[in-house]
Image (spheres, rainbow, N blue to C red):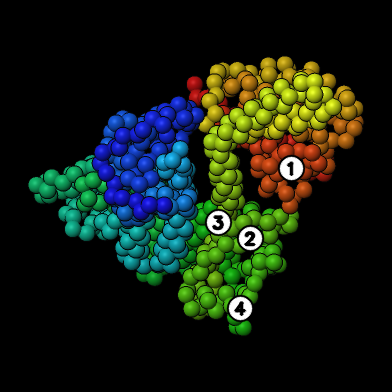
Amino acid sequence: MEKMKKISPVAPSVPRPFFNPSDFAVFAQTNEAIFLHHSHTGVVVTLNEKACEMFGYTHEEARRLGMVAMTPGEYPYTAEEALRRFREAAAGAPQMFEWKTKNKAGHEFWVEGYLKAVAIGDHDFVLAIFRDITRRKLSEQRLLLDHGSLALLQETILAVMGKLDESDLLVAMVHRAGSLLGTPHGFIYLFNETSGLLELKVPAVGGRLSPTVEPGDGLAGKVWKTGEPAVSQSRQVFMTDAAEDEDMEVATVAVPLKRGTKPAGVLGLYSPDEEYHFREDEVLLLAKFADMAAVALANAAEHTAVRRGLSTSKAAEAALRLSEERYRMLFNSIHDILFIAEITSDGLPGLIVDANETACHRLGYNREELLERTPTDIVPIELRGDSREKIELLYAQKHISLESAYLTSSNTTIPVEVDTHLVYLDERPCMVSIARDISERKRVEKEMARLDRLNLIGSMAAGIGHEIRNPLTTVRGFLQMMSAKDHFADHRNHFDLMINELDRANAIITEFLSLAKNKAVDLKEGSLNTIVTMLLPLLEAGAILYNKAVKTDLAEIPEVPLDEKEIRQLVVNLARNGLDAMPPGGTLTIRTSCRDDQVVLSVQDQGKGIAPDIADMVGTPFFTTKEYGVGLGLAVCYSIAARHGATITFDSGTGGTTFSVHFPLRNK
């Protein structure tokens, strides 16, 4: 292929013989942005309406500016990298990638790109297809953010738990709170019951705060009085009168430090960056930290009182008992599995010496049973590995993180992500392990991967399905014409066989096209019960032929937005799969119900169930266990559900399988 020339800002004239806009019409209704570039100049020859909508440019603007105008410029999403990918695609190496781009207004978003060289007549082009994946990327980033925030919160609480000196603890609280939200600027006020004022204990770095605040005054006073977090963009809400000349607009967040239900003080952070705003999830994270840190603060106060000497041993015992209760409250307030285990003299995990309530609940043991086990005992045998090697690594790094699984008392496994810290209790080495259940994250990752595969095949269906069907139609027409001629009468059976096979292939392509992610749907308020009732005679007729039965259990449910034609196909596909899975004499049950703000359609069969080793493949296009199946029925169901914003789950055992489609209720 000729070396690509420098991209020209002016679109070349496109001769009629090799390109006609009607050739591009097949892409007009897709939900992907599609560009056709001249392979030698990079100039946009044409684009579909979705491309104009996605990027905000008119056809003429896009042709004049080209792809470089749509790159944000930050590494690695640069014009140079975009041109490199374009050249490789033009040279015959298709490119598939995720890319951060921008629209005409300058707003950045994420796309999945596919570049491929195509030839039209005697001329070479590069076809570029972009799918908006911003929502998926944001979900992935939110999962990572949630995971990172919780891990950091756990590490932070462990750091403050060991502080028994009140002054050290207050400084550590500000420092650790700042590390959670990414700012070193913080302060703490504590309420003095004698004076009735909030007194500044830890001043903000570089700030001039009032040494005392009246309850109800300023941001700190209001937070203490209401017991609720608050956010402000004005520094004046907590600065002294002497500082009013510093008219800075900065983001400030303050949360209450509570003892029980009563506020004992206020923890605050601020950022001097005038453009910064504290997000809602950051406020919630800081409030959670403050709840836990307040318990540590009360614990430190009791220890301080003991150190100074209490008047009687009875009072000392009561204070230490209260301190232990507060420690236990803090320990049990962590919602992940948390336990402390000894490290034996020969470098192996010893018995668990303490565990929180979450550990007991999730693992299915009471506290006494758990304290009779070692951390190794609750890990499946195939995942245990070399325990001595892990302890050596813990001694070397003081902290290790890994993915593993825990075995419950009922012999089920829970996938977990474990953070383990080395600590010393009474000069004895111990390991503190915090394990977060990542079952939901694993499920979401698996669902995202499955949807990506389905979307890819759906895009292929939209792009090539019609191109395959058109020549088949031509071949079928000629076969019909030839079979009607007298001198081919001896071969008429052969012609009929070929026509039947072409019709079968055409039916498969029709089903394949149903996978298209961007197939237009006409959503109208409708009742699932009405559709099931309408289809019941058809399903019963098919079942009776094989000595099987179909029954319904329809609850009173609200209407949901649906495309009746597509839902009919979904119900028929699920019902036929269920009937095929059952032996003669079996009964298929179709149910509807309403639960958890969802309308649920369930199809239950009495077959032998789905084997666990193939459960992950269910819904994958072209995967089938039927002798004469194509493997598109369930894939089409998943695609239809996705277009309706619904999800499909299934529960399978030796007594049969139930597929459930969960339709979200529209907010009224």
Q: Mark 1–mark 4 contact, CB under 8 Å?
A: no
Q: Residues within 10 Å of mark 2 (few under 14, many from 20)?
A: many
State the image quarter where residue 249 is shown.
top left
Check if mark 2's residue and mark 3's residue have beta carbons within 8 Å: no
The residue drawn where x is 75% and y is 28% is 499
Q: Residue 74 — which label?
A: none
Instruction: Give how far across and how far down residue 326 sits, in percent.
Output: 48, 58
Nearer mark to the viewer, of 3 and 1: 1
175 vs 581: above or below: below
Which is nearer the N-term, disc 3 or disc 1? 3
Q: Which mark is residue 388?
A: 4
For residue 381, above or below residue 365? below
User: What is the x, y in percent for residue 108?
Assistant: 33, 42
**Which residue is under mark 2?**
405
Residue at point 36%, 67% (across, down)? 165
Indicate which disc, 2 or 1, sits on the residue closer to the N terminus.
2
**Mark 1, residue position:** 624
Q: Earlier in the sequence, mark 2 or mark 3?
A: 2
Q: Is residue 376 above or below residue 272?
A: below
Residue type at numbered disc 1: Thr
Q: Earlier in the sequence, mark 1 or mark 4?
A: 4
Tag 1, which secondary structure?
loop
In 3D space, how far apart are the residues under numbered discs 2 and 1 (Cα atoms)? 31 Å
Q: Amino acid at mark 4?
A: Arg
Residue underneath mark 3: 436
- Disc 2 versus disc 3: nearer the observer: 2
Q: Nearer the viewer, mark 1 or mark 4?
A: 1
Q: Amino acid at mark 2?
A: Ala
Going by the image, does 611 lie left or right of 326?
Answer: right
Q: Give the Cα separation between the discs numbered 2 and 3.
A: 10 Å
Q: Horizontal placement of 359 versus 45: left or right?
A: right
Q: Residue 436's x, y, as percent?
A: 55, 56
